[in-house]
Amino acid sequence: MTDAAAPPRPSGANRYVGLFARYGIVWVTVALFVLLAITTDGFLTGPNLRNVLDQQATLLIAASVATLTMIAGGFDVSISAVAVAAPLVALRVENATGSVALALLAGCAFGLVVGTANGSIVAFARINSFITTLATSFIVFGIGYVVSERSIMRPSSDSFRDIARTRFAELTTATWISLAVVLMAWITLAATRFGRHVYATGGNVEAARLAGVRTRQVVVAVFALSGLAAGLAGVVAASRTISATPSDDFSFVFGVIAAIVVGGTSIAGGTGAVWRTLLGAFFIAFMVNGFNLHQIDPIWQRIIQGLVILVAVATDAWSRARRA
Amino acid sequence: MADPQPGEPAHIDEPAHIELRAVSKRFGTTQAVDRADISIRRGCIHALVGENGAGKSTVGKIIVGVHTADSGSMIVNGRPCRFRSPRQAFTSGITAIAQELALVPDRSVADNVFLGVESTRCGFVARNDTVQRFEALVERTGIPIDPAARVGSLSVADQQRVEILRAAARRSEFVIMDEPSARLSAQERDQLHRLVRSLRDQKITVLFISHFLDEVLELADDITVMRDGRVVRSTKPSSETTGSLVEAMIGRKLEGNFPPKPPPPEPSQSPVLRVRDLIPAGSAGHPASAATPLMAGLDLDVLPGEIVGIAGLVGSGRTEFVRCVYGADRPVAGSVQVAGGRAGRFRPRESISAGLGLIPESRKDQGLLMERSLRENVGLPHLRRVTRAGLVTRRSERELVSASAARAGVRGGGLETPVRLLSGGNQQKSLFARWTAPGLRVLIADEPTRGVDVGSKRSIYDLIAAAATDGLAVLLVSSELEELVGLCHRVLVMRDGRFVAEFIHPDLDETQILRHAFGEEAAVGQNS
């Protein structure tokens, strides 16, 4: 209080509230894990936890990269469409060439192209990213129907399922791929120059530009990466089910966004982290797993999930307002 | 009060329409208005003049209830009054026409004029009645304008007329005009003056806030001069000249607390910054002005170790000029050359590698990432230097930033403190810290002491002097003349996008600078 230049220091209870709000997702995820481990038979078992990891793989692939997009101030809803259409493109290539590697590559390339288009429209035509990706979603869903000729597609050989279902050290390749993607996204965001530029662009685009950040390239890049990851997620999902269907189902991106915001990454951009998304995804996954083990009606599960997301976003808004 | 003078309105003995008594208003550390007493007579044009930041606009905003005074009282028509919102003032017949007009651009002129007071029949807008009302209004005010025109398609002058019509439609008795002529052409100004006089003829009181002293002397019945939030004097145009007003606006300020000036640069050196024929585009905030490149090509050379000040009123093109030098906005034409390197038009990124650094006008909107740490804010343009094998090494980054922050004297938090928690002065110093890295040749600072407490001001002056001592060329934009006089080797005055005068230390004089900024060379010629 003596130094006029000193910042206001949160004191006493206020500081703990601040710390709780800041690392809240860590505490609640740990608390939920411990609670389920104690109360629920069958939760803390190898097969169950491996199963949770395997089921979360596709979501984690898409969400960890989409975290970068969100921090850069963008909002990508085309993830659903890309995750639906990319495996159809991949399977078309697989059916034609018989090569699983080419199929995987084609699926990812498709996502990259869509993402780059999204980013370019957002950065250069300056159209709101939600609207842009909503519009391109319809186009991409349409492409999915065209590529698949409106029918379910299956791989020509069984080796397509090896993308996701091979096991190393008891974990599926789907899990390994997702962990690798999470790690890459994490390092890129936290430790590279590009990652810093992502934070700067989302935090204050004008200040970033004046500090020498090529903000438009950053925007194009995060959307391109998000498209690439969505394509990969789609192919992995198709490999798990050994099929792909065209549909215009938007629900995948809802899970992705839920994981990101429950983790504590701000939808306003500028703050957040990949580890947050990882925890957000597992918090939701543990919750669902716990419900299932307790055989709670899926309808109630949905309602509770919705409430949890609301609480997460409200906490973010509340802690932001407190600072202002 | 003296005898009525020729040209005075006849209703001189009427009581004050609005009277402010000892009104004060504080924003953070700035005393914007300090015990101001202003009496505004009914049916007069009352001008309020002063330097940038003298408190004129704040007075207007207190009257209409945008701001609430911290202390003091306001008497309207003989009764104490205090408005909590512009809407409340509106219903009492008081309207403000702000610097930034508040119209709905996508609606028609008539819709805007009657917004909130529409003629309705059974809840529907009555079109015929609206047309009649509009015609009556045009007749009463003598402002011809197409009621069906879309407001967004009108010129600034016409939009202003729409605002005036809107005030008239509500039978306002008191109209506040804040810098109404700032964005108008000479011809439009004349029309505006006629309009203001016609308002007076209709017994409407006008509070006219303006930078243009000629205009004020010609138009006003009363003039109040403000300086540093205080009323210097209330006076009559007949007893003032532009010179006497300028003097009153500057006054004898407290002796500024400045570091000794670094030795003036050796004139034989080659300039480190060379600007040629630069034609700036409009600033980012005013895209409309991009269409009117009223600026001529600007030339400027700055020597190493030289501090060059740029003076001028808000809107004179100072900020636009330095932003274009840095490449924050792309100039229409011209070139910038740093230390004999490539001459051209640069983007910020290229400017930085050439050795330019900009401390922008608004640290919050253009300078800092408020949610991020001091480390990230200071390090942002220099990450390449601390990157090894593609990864930013946290340790080298911390070393770089802590050295810079120490040199700039940033206090009030550690390297990981979000800058939003720092005081205004320390936030500004963290921007200086950003540009203390080696390799910098030219530092551009736009209003570096705005909203900064007195102690930090002195530190910032020290930083500017130290930069020059280290051989940097410094370009300093400031509205505070004493700052320019106290720090600079040379001051250029800008008006209407041109350099109109140059003063070299030790012949720096606040009065002379301000006269040129206001466009009073004639008066200067007579006096000197």
Image (tube, coloured by chain):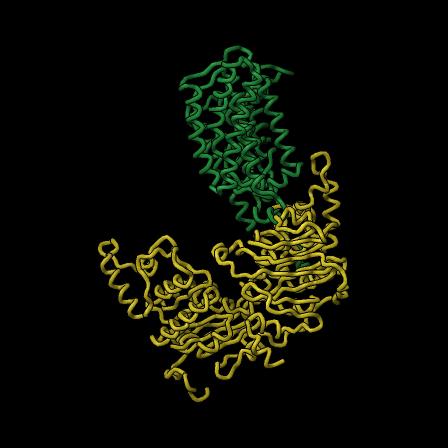
Chain colours: A green, B yellow
Residue in the image at 52% along x and 10% along y: A157
Q: Is residue B518 visible?
A: yes
Left or right: where B376 falls relative to A299: right
Residue in the image at 41% along x and 60% along y: B155
Q: Is residue A10 visible?
A: no
Q: Nearer the viewer, residue B496 or A181?
A: B496
Q: Is residue A281 above or below residue A264?
A: above
Q: Nearer the viewer, residue A321 or B182?
A: B182
Left or right: where B504 falls relative to A64: right
Query: Could you say where residue B506 lies in the image, as x and y percent from the top left?
Result: 71, 72
Query: Could you say where residue B351 lies in the image, as x and y percent from the top left?
Result: 65, 49
Left or right: where A283 falls relative to A245: right
Query: Could you say where residue B445 lies in the image, as x and y percent from the top left?
Result: 65, 58
Query: Could you say where residue A306 lies in the image, as x and y percent from the top left?
Result: 45, 33
Q: Nearer the viewer, residue B398 or A28?
A: B398
Q: Is residue B255 above or below residue A177?
A: below
- The furthest residue to the top: A157
Which quarter of the figure has residue B497?
Answer: bottom right
Left or right: where A181 falls relative to B388: left
Residue in the image at 36% along x and 68% along y: B92
Which quarter of the figure has residue A18?
Answer: top right
